[in-house]
Image (cartoon, rainbow, N blue to C red):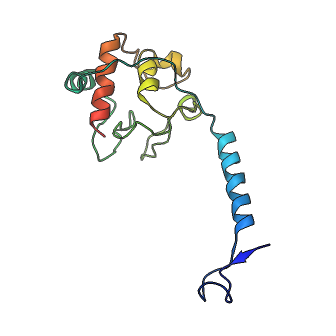
């Protein structure tokens, strides 16, 4: 096996690195995490352009009782904070006293505009078993405005 960084190569005192072993552990780790967390592809939908100012009003009316939208990323123990949710795997916020349903944790969703657009229409249909009590936002423009607001808060 090839070792780099021994006392005869590289700088004295650096640990010896076995690159074959490092790569093997990396591959095993990636395969294990891929098996543990299924990936859910984005739905094939077109998300209309929304208006963040209108989305702020929708958030206040429909979401704020359970969710926060500040950079402080603090849960109010009813729902997770939504700041920086775009690009995050569903069910990964680790707030004190907040627990996700297994439906969300095991969904394989990485939040995107497309996932949110479909999810916010009918949360319980998109992720059966979710604890989110919201029936959904049925108007496409309202969902698009809310998503624009969420993007604007990142």
> Does 101 sit above or below residue 13?
above
Q: Residue furthest top?
A: 139
Where in the figure is residue 147, as x and y percent of width and height?
Answer: 33, 26
Q: Quadrant of residue 113?
A: top left
Left or right of 41, for residue 70: left
Left or right of 96, for residue 146: left
Where in the figure is residue 27, as x and y percent of width and height?
Answer: 70, 53
Residue at (36, 38) in percent of width and height: 81
| Residue 64 seen anywhere in this rendered image of the structure | no
- How many marks the image carries: the answer is 0
> Does 131 sit above or below residue 38?
above
Where in the figure is residue 45, as x and y percent of width and height?
Answer: 46, 17
Residue at (39, 33) in percent of width and height: 79
Where in the figure is residue 148, as x and y percent of width and height?
Answer: 29, 27
> Does 65 sit above or below residue 30?
above
| Residue 150 seen anywhere in this rendered image of the structure | yes
């Amino acid at each position: 096996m090839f070792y780099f960084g021994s006392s005869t190569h590289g700088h004295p005192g650096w640990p010896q690195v076995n690159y074959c072993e490092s790569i093997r552990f990396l591959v095993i780790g990636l395969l294990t995490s891929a098996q543990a967390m299924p990936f859910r592809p984005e739905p094939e939908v077109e998300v209309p352009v929304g208006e963040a100012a209108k989305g702020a009003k929708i958030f206040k009316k429909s979401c704020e009782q359970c969710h926060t939208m500040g950079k402080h990323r603090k849960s109010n123990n009813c729902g997770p904070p939504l700041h920086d949710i775009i690009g995050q795997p569903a069910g990964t916020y680790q707030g004190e006293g907040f627990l996700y349903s297994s439906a969300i944790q095991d969904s394989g969703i990485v939040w995107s505009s497309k996932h949110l657009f479909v999810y916010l229409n009918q949360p319980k249909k998109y992720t059966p078993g979710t604890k989110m009590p919201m029936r959904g936002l049925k108007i496409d423009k309202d969902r698009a405005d809310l998503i624009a607001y969420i993007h604007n808060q990142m």
